[in-house]
Image (spheres, rainbow, N blue to C red):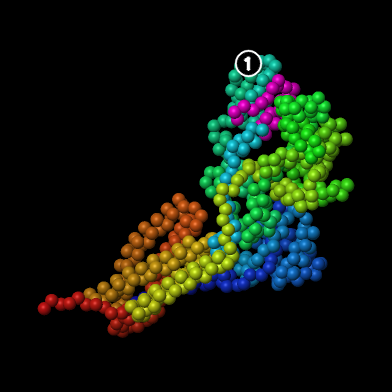
Amino acid sequence: MYRYAHWKYAVIVFILALATVYILPNFFRTVPAIQISSARQSAHINESTLRAAKITLQIAGIPYRDLFLHQNSVKIRFANPQHQHQAYLAIQKQFGSSYIMALNQLVNSPVWMHKIGAQPLFLGLDLRGGVHFLLQVDTEAVLNKTMDRYMSDLRHALIDQNILPSSMMKQNKRIVLIFANALATQKSQEVIRQATPLQTFKQSSNQLILDLPKGELDRIQRRMIQQNIHTLHNRINELGVAEPVVQQAGFDRIIVELPGIQDTAKAKDILGRTAILQVRMVDDDEAANREAITGNVPPGYELLDDGQRKILVSQDVELTGDNISDAQAGFDQNGAPAVHIRLDSRGAEIFRQVTAANIGQRMAMVLIEKNKTEVVTAPVIRSEIGGGQVEISGHMNSAEANDIALLLRSGALAAPMSIIEESIVGPSLGQENIQKGLYATLWGFIAVACFMVLYYRVFGLISAGSLLVNVVLLLAILSALQATLTLPGIAAIALTLGMAIDSNVLINERIREELRNGATPHFAMQAGYRFAWATILDSNVTSFIAGAALFSLGSGSVKGFAVVHCLGILTSMFSAVFVSRGLVHLWYGNRNRLASLSIGQIWQPKTPA
């Protein structure tokens, strides 16, 4: 009698039940939903956020299907887009700007599936439609900005220690300091060491040259890339794009994919803009201004346009947009569009000190955007301003005020970027890709199953069953891992079907060989699975190594293909050997007298006459 352990059946049933649970969400339709996520580290997403959203909807009388916590966000599903829109307005009014509200589409699966991570397959851009950008980070600008910041830090640190350099300038990406005497030069070195990581090279008794230490530029660039990725995430969340892809590609490039977005102009405008706010002091000396207009701009100043005339603005930055904790569009006292800014505690203290030390002078709010530097407003400081509340108004309309508030709120890009590659995939093309991919896989499966049944009869039917289990397991694992399925991924599934059936062919042919040699049916089945296992393992291990190499060296769609390919190898080995053997035992195992096996025609070699 051909025996198969009961615990192995228990394992098969458990895995198939688990796979069924994780593949089920793919069969539910999507419904309108709202996703609430945190816009600031101080705003947490937890059970209290969930209760607050529930109370808000109940007070507003807006019906909803359900709401739940998932991946640091609250998700609420609705029956129709009207309730979704009403809830969006009510929750946004209640929660304020500390939270990001995004309109979304969620699968209408039971909540318990979400809690155990049973989600539908995440489809790539080529299957859903949307826009793709490849952004190049300007590393040269990163270095210049870093040196500017170090110059500002140094200036404040030296002033605090009453060490005033005669001159401070930037030359060839280095900072050159000239002091009045050797003693000041000597004392400044300790201050420089504490305030910055710059290396000091003493050129002469009164001059110091400061440079970035080796490896520091690489560290700064990596940090800038990560900050840009974080900022891009914030901006995309503000746009309400669900499931975007923002990831580093190479040393100085970033890939952005926005599913569902077809307006590339708007996406490019928001993603590529670098809104940097700086607070600088203005020199109102009439003689200096006249000289500057003729072309003789004093060192340490630049001539900028404030919308009415040219003014002299110091290059020393007193405060930057890094200290902004919130920014909202609104109107000033005269009813003109304005942006209301709230500073964090450090920014509020710096702003208080600057306004206290410069009463009677003008302070310029400088906005740097699209490589254009302009003065938004330059009011006269009448008194010390505390509390961290700042208002900027000037030559802007309401739409521009909204855009500036959005960019300042989501954070400025750490370094400017340029779009070097863009492509758009229409939703109809994505749906067409899905249909063609599914049809190719389905018809491939049917063709393979028909051939196996015709050629191997009952064993062919069992092979087709194990092949179906293989597909179910593969899709369930992809759904559980939330791997991105792309068109190359569908190609990998089709390839997996072909490779998986090879294992069954090896087993069936091995059983045929044992029968041909005169073995009994029970012995032939045991020997077939035992001896074929080594060959199956060898062939799949080499394919797995090739897939692992693709994953480690490839990127984008190549990596997606490699993931599906490697997972398909693992599931095919399990289904071809473990599941297939269990099905064979169910069919033949309990028969004490087994005269033959339904495994197709067994060709006998001709006996020489």
* Magenta stretch encompasses residue 154: yes
Location of the C terminus (image quadrant) = bottom left
Q: Is residue 572 left or right of residue 261?
A: left
Q: Is the residue 69 above or below the residue 524 in the image?
A: above
Q: Is residue 118 left or right of residue 582?
A: right
**Nearest the camera: 414 or 435?**
435
Q: Identify the residue position indicated by label 1 in the image.
A: 205
**Nearest the camera: 595 or 203?**
203
Residue at x-position 71% and y-position 69%: 81
- The span picked out in magenta is 149-173
**Nearest the camera: 94 or 165?**
165
Q: Is the residue 357 above or below the residue 36 in the image?
A: above
**Quarter assignment of residue 164:** top right
Q: Is residue 12 left or right of residue 182?
A: left
Three-letter code for the amino acid on which mark 1 is drawn:
Ser
**Quarter assignment of residue 351:** top right
**Nearest the camera: 383 or 439?**
439
The single residue placed furthest to the front in the displayed view is 294
Q: How far from the left and from the top, in percent, is residue 565? A: 44, 61
Q: Is the residue 381 above or below the residue 419 in the image?
A: above
* Magenta stretch encompasses residue 19: no
Q: How far from the left and from the top, in percent, is residue 436? A: 49, 69
Residue at x-position 74% and y-position 44%: 324
